Image (tube, helix red, strand yellow):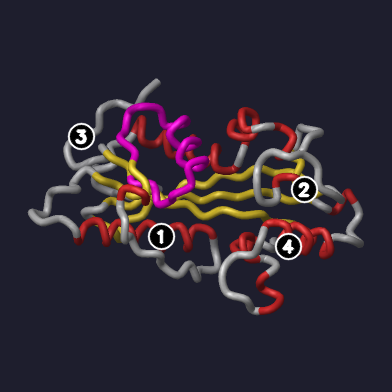
């Protein structure tokens, strides 16, 4: 069921802080048609803040605040983006045997070794993960994908609401499957015998960490008045 029409000054338009079409499609599919959705492609010149927080929540909040403040600064009359809210996410893989690594460094896991800037190629990240777990038995390869969404109002960028999702599973000893991206070929979610790269988007998008976080966001948007006193929630 689509969320009810939001009250004045509440959520009417979501600015999703990504240019990743796959991610945007997943979020739109779960939220339904109750909101207009824009992306970074609609805001050329938007800032790329340094994501240097030690947690997913911290990095998601950095991105949400930065983009919300930048959009707000574009208002000429102060109300142009009154119903706009920014949605940003940070996500990654946590492996129990590695103390939760690669965690917030998931996209640049291999690059950490040489102090290289930027993200690492997927193949290098996966190869490093397998090397790190080479002596770890199957029963100790527990892991989870985790996602945190940060929602910020353009008219009040410092106010952040967080929504978290996780998908537990395990890391296998070699690549399986051709779908998905990142660590998907190495990760089997609990309750399944196939990797994320074998399950396909329909199943993955139903059980994934991001799907769980977006579902929590959708439930909140459908039942709460985001303009109410006391925002952010709980």
Q: Considering only order in the chain, which callout, 3 or 2, is on the residue closer to the N terminus?
A: 3
Distance between the alpha carbons at the discs numbered 2 and 4: 13 Å
Where is residue 45, by image quadrant?
bottom left
Q: Is 32 in the magenta?
A: yes
Q: Which residue is mark 3?
A: 7
Q: Which residue is mark 1?
A: 63
Task: Give the crowd class for mark 4: few <14, some 14-19, many >=20 residues within 10 Å.
Answer: some
* Badge 1 vs badge 2, beta-carbon distance below 8 Å: no
Q: Which residue is mark 2?
A: 186
In this rendering, position of residue 198 left or right of residue 10: right
Distance between the alpha carbons at the discs numbered 2 and 3: 44 Å
Image height of 220 relative to 172, above or below: above
Q: Position of residue 121 (x, y in %)?
A: 66, 61
Distance between the alpha carbons at the discs numbered 1 and 4: 26 Å
In this rendering, position of residue 18 left or right of residue 188: left
Which type of secondary structure does the marked residue at label 3 adopt?
loop
What mark, if any, has residue 124 been given in the picture? 4
């Amino acid at each position: 069921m689509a969320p009810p029409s939001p009250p004045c000054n509440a959520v009417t338009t979501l600015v999703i802080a990504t240019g990743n079409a796959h991610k945007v499609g997943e979020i739109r599919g779960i939220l339904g048609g109750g909101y207009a959705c824009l992306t970074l492609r609609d805001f050329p010149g938007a800032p790329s803040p340094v994501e240097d927080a030690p947690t997913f929540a911290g990095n998601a909040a950095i991105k949400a605040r930065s983009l919300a403040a930048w959009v707000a600064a574009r208002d000429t009359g102060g109300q142009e983006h009154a119903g706009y809210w920014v949605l940003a996410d940070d996500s990654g893989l946590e492996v129990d045997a590695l103390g939760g690594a690669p965690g917030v460094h998931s996209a640049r896991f291999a690059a950490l070794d040489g102090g290289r800037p930027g993200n690492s190629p997927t193949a290098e990240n996966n190869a490093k993960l397998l090397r790190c777990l080479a002596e770890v038995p199957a029963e100790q390869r527990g892991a989870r994908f985790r996602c945190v969404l940060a929602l910020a109002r353009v008219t009040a960028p410092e106010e952040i609401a967080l929504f978290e999702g996780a998908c537990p599973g395990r890391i296998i000893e070699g690549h399986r499957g051709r779908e998905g991206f990142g660590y998907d070929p190495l990760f089997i979610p609990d309750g399944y015998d196939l990797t994320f790269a074998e399950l396909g988007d329909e199943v993955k998008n139903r059980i994934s960490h991001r799907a769980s976080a977006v579902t929590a966001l959708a439930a909140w948007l459908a039942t709460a008045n985001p303009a109410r006193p006391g925002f952010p929630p709980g």
